[in-house]
Image (cartoon, helix red, strand yellow):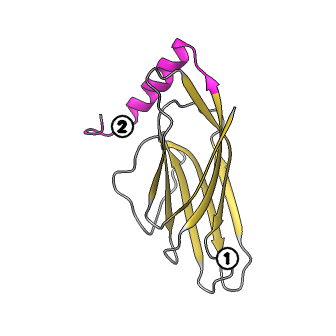
């Protein structure tokens, strides 16, 4: 089964995609992740960085966002850029082998104009056996910051 989510996320905002269940036996994998600027054709440059994270971001930044592929909390990232004299372009990277069974979080940072950004997310729902359930849950717990448990 494929579940879809979409929304408009403000600069510095964070959306929660609620996926957790009581027994953790339902897992998810990202199938598709796309973003699209909120105001195509505006004269200001736009540089939206939209991330999918395993854990809630405790400190959001509204400019100067960094992307670190060694960050184990990162499930995917997309970049949307547009300038006054350039056409829009986007790049998306999703770590497709990752299975998770807890809530995920989507953040947006615009390094140029503080603009909101649209996102579209497709998740494939998969049934987890007890071992897979335990592994997915433990991976999530390991990524929590002190005080988030």
In depth, the one of 40 and 138 nearer the eye is 40
Looking at the image, residue 58 lies above or below residue 75 = below
Q: Is residue 13 magenta?
A: no
Mark 1 vs mark 2: give the one in front. Answer: 1
Q: Residue at x 59, y 75 (%)?
A: 46
Which element carries disc 2, helix, strand or loop? loop
Q: Quadrant of the C terminus?
A: top left
Looking at the image, residue 88 lies above or below residue 139 = below
The circle on residue 144 is 2
Q: Quadrant of residue 127?
A: top right
Q: Residue at x 69, y 63 (%)?
A: 90
Label 1, label 2: how far apart the Cα atoms are: 36 Å
Q: Residue at x 58, y 19 (%)?
A: 128
Q: Quadrant of the N terminus?
A: top right
Q: Give the residues drawn in magenta, as a range.
A: 126-148
The x, y position of residue 8, in whole percent, is 55, 62
Tell which residue pokes out farthest to the top in this image.
Answer: 130
Question: Horizontally, is 81 left or right of 13 in the view?
Answer: right
The circle on residue 40 is 1
Question: Horizontally, is 86 left or right of 19 in the view?
Answer: right
In depth, the one of 115 and 87 nearer the eye is 115
Return the disc, 1 or 2, that comes first in the chain's sequence: 1
The x, y position of residue 79, in whole percent, is 62, 62
Q: Residue at x 53, y 73 (%)?
A: 115
Which element carries disc 1, helix, strand or loop? loop
The x, y position of residue 4, in whole percent, is 65, 45
Tell which residue pokes out farthest to the left in this image.
Answer: 147
- The local crowd at label 2, few if under 14, some if 14 to 19, many if 20 or more residues have their Cα within 10 Å, is some
Do the CB atoms of the residues marked 1 and 2 lie less than 8 Å apart? no
The x, y position of residue 15, in whole percent, is 47, 53
Q: Is residue 141 magenta?
A: yes
The circle on residue 92 is none
């Amino acid at each position: 089964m494929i579940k879809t989510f979409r929304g408009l996320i403000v600069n510095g905002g964070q959306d929660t995609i609620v996926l957790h269940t009581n027994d953790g036996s339902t897992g998810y994998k990202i199938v598709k992740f796309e973003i699209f600027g909120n105001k195509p054709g505006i004269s200001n440059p736009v540089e939206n960085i939209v991330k999918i994270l395993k854990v809630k971001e405790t400190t959001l930044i509204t400019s100067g966002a960094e992307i670190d592929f060694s960050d184990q909390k990162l499930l995917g990232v997309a970049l949307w850029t547009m300038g006054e004299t350039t056409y829009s372009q986007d790049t998306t990277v999703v770590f497709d082998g990752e299975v998770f069974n807890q809530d995920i979080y989507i953040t947006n940072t615009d390094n140029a104009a503080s603009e909101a950004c649209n996102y579209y997310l497709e998740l494939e729902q998969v049934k987890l056996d007890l071992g897979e359930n335990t592994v997915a849950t433990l991976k999530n717990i390991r990524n929590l910051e002190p005080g988030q448990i």
